[in-house]
Image (cartoon, rainbow, N blue to C red):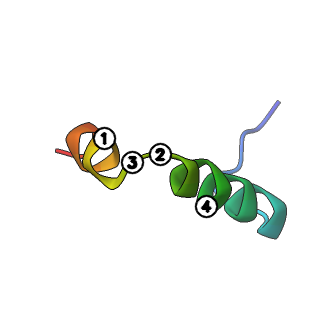
Amino acid sequence: MEYSLTLTANEVNYLLGVLNQRPYAEVEALIP
């Protein structure tokens, strides 16, 4: 089973929704 790194529009929208629910400080802390 191959795994594609390409994000679908639905996945992008989901990730954006998750990030919008988090405090920006927390998001920045997760990114090196």
In screen coordinates, is 15 left or right of 19?
Answer: right
- Element marked by disc 4: helix
In screen coordinates, is 15 left or right of 14?
Answer: left
- Give the residue number, with chain letter if any, for mark 2: 22
* Residue 8 sits in quarter: bottom right
Evaluate if marks 3 and 1 touch, with contact meaning CB atoms under 8 Å apart.
Answer: yes
The CA distance from mark 2 to mark 3 is 4 Å
Query: Residue 17, how many percent across, how many down?
Result: 66, 56
The CA distance from mark 2 to mark 4 is 10 Å
Pick the residue in front: 8 or 2. 8
- For the view shown, which residue lies furthest in the top direction? 1
Residue 7 makes an appearance in the image: no
Q: Quadrant of the N terminus?
A: top right
Evaluate if marks 2 and 1 touch, with contact meaning CB atoms under 8 Å apart.
Answer: yes
* Residue 14 sits in quarter: bottom right
In screen coordinates, is 19 left or right of 26?
Answer: right
Residue type, numbered disc 1 = Glu
Among the two numbered marks 3 and 4 on one chain, the one whose residue lies closer to the N terminus = 4
Residue depicted at 61% across the width and 48% down the height: 18
- Give the residue number, with chain letter if any, for mark 4: 16
Pick the residue in front: 12 or 20. 20
| Image mark count | 4
- Give the residue number, with chain letter if any, for mark 1: 26
